[in-house]
Image (tube, helix red, strand yellow):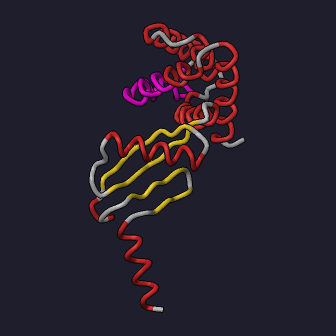
Amino acid sequence: MTPRTAAGRYARALLDVAVLEADPRKAGHDLGTFHQLMAGHAQLHQALTNPALPMTRKRAIVEELAKRAELSPIVTKLLLLLAERGRLALLADIVDTYRVRLMDYLQVVEAEVTTATPMSDEQTKTVEDSLHRATGRKVSLVSHVDPDIVGGLVARVGSTVYDGSVRRQLELMKARMRS
């Protein structure tokens, strides 16, 4: 089994349990918190992913860190299971996969919108509403500014791109004039 496949199974199991027994958002937050803790401390990451360190020691470290960070019981159980099985190296992939699954469960889609100038709150709301109608899901909007698009906007939702930029319209006009 590939590491990505294993991470997917752990993420799915965590979401299933979180939906039944806890708050899935809190579980995702707690999982991310522990991942940031490991990623921010190279020695900790090295110790917890080192196969030479005894499982009992890894388990004790994870228990102490989970207690101090006040992680939810279901996330703590998952982290202890990962420590026992020597799978803490999968944590980054588990966090990424869990986040995707959580967004799907919550019926939320992420959209990236690029405009030539910053959008006002009213414009942002209008774009969110339009994308909500197009996708049928709640929209989590991330906006970027790129003066090169001249005007209009480019929205990316998953693998779909809605390009309403002036730059794109000019390119299309240019292509039509050539043919």
The answer to whether residue 140 is left or right of residue 101 is left
The answer to whether residue 150 is left or right of residue 22 is left
Task: Return the residue found at the far right.
Answer: 1
Q: How many marks?
A: 0
- Is 111 colored magenta in this rendering? no
Q: Residue at x 51, y 40 (%)?
A: 139
Q: Report the front residue among 145 and 33.
A: 145
Task: Return the residue found at the far bottom.
Answer: 179
Q: Quadrant of residue 106?
A: top right
Highlighted magenta segment, given as a residue range: 32-53
Q: Report the front residue among 174 and 93.
A: 174
Q: Quadrant of residue 164?
A: bottom left
- Tell me if residue 132 comes above or below residue 173 in the rendering: above
The kind of secondary structure the magenta stretch mainly shows is helix
- Tell me if residue 142 comes above or below residue 88 in the rendering: below
Q: Report the front residue among 153 and 104.
A: 153
Q: Residue at x 46, y 13 (%)?
A: 65
Query: Horizontal and vertical percent for residue 66?
Result: 49, 12
Query: Horizontal and vertical percent for residue 152?
Result: 36, 60
Query: Horizontal and vertical percent for residue 176?
Result: 46, 85
Q: Look at the image and tell me in which quarter the N terminus lies.
A: top right
- Is 41 colored magenta in this rendering? yes
The answer to whether residue 67 is left or right of residue 148 is right
Q: Residue at x 46, y 63 (%)?
A: 163
Q: Residue at x 61, y 35 (%)?
A: 107
